[in-house]
Structure formats: C-alpha cells, structure tokens
Amino acid sequence: MSAIYVLDTHTLVWILEGNPKLSERAKQCVLHGAAQLVIPAIALAEACAMIQKQRTAITIPELTSALDADARFVVLALDKAIVLESQAFISLSEMHDRLIVTSTKHVPGATLITCDEEIRTVAGLTTIW
C-alpha cells in the first residue's frame, strides 16, 4: 500500500516553488512516486490567496498545471462535516489550521506534512517535517 500524505499550504507552495525551506524529510515523502498527495480545499484556497498577494513566484496557471499534471494530487473537498468537526480544535489559533487538521483526520492512514509547530502538537495527529 502506498503512503498517503496531506499537504498543508506552505508544503504545497514550497513543493511547487522548489523552495529550500521544504525539509529533506518532507521532500523525500513527496518525491516518493507511489505516494498519494492530498490537498485540503482550504490549503488550495490559501495557496491561491498567496499567489494573488504575490507572496510566491508561482502563478495560478502554474499551480493548476502542476496539480493536473500529477495524478498523485487529489483535492479533498471542504464539506459540512469537516467544518463542524474543526470546531473541536479550538486550541489552534487559526481557522485554516483547524480545517487542515480535520481534513487530515478524514483521510484514513494519512500523515500531514507541515512545518507549523502549533499543528504538530495536536494529539492523535500524525505529522512529519
């Protein structure tokens, strides 16, 4: 069985940029050809916002092309269950982070790739960086 990784916003953007801030461990997981790469819809929306605010050099067409070109990328929809369950993570200061954590918990066997130290403290969540 192949590994399943959920990518947070920075991980997604840094992969596409080739940014050296991406940890070696994260890079190895993403480069593993059989790994499934799940992108929570909120992370995709945040990546688009970063592009629009010019906080990254990538463009929306480059983002779209990269996601379409690699069948390992799967976007996980944001639904009512995820939104409501995210309210349990009030210890996380950012709504977006709560939604990413809850999205990860909706993917059986998934590991979240994140550099966010606050997210990495959530009990019962498997993360790497």
Image (spheres, grey):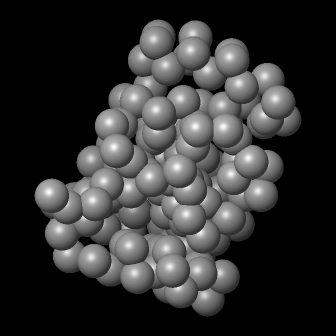
Name the residue: 46% across, 80% down: 27
The image quarter containing residue 61 is bottom left
49 over 76 or under it: above or below:
below
Name the residue: 38% across, 48% down: 110
- Specify whether 31 is left or right of 46: left
Q: Nearer the viewer, residue 110 or 84?
A: 110
Q: Is residue 37 visible?
A: yes
Point out the residue furthest to the front here. Answer: 124
Name the residue: 62% across, 21% down: 86
| Figure quadrant of the N terminus | bottom left
Q: Is residue 19 visible?
A: no
Name the residue: 40% across, 30% down: 106
Q: Nearer the viewer, residue 57 or 80?
A: 80
| Residue 66: percent from left, percent from top | 31, 67
116 over 110 or under it: above or below:
below
Q: Nearer the viewer, residue 125 or 29?
A: 125
| Residue 43: percent from left, percent from top | 53, 46
8 over 97 or under it: above or below:
below
| Residue 118: percent from left, percent from top | 79, 49
| Figure quadrant of the C terminus | bottom right
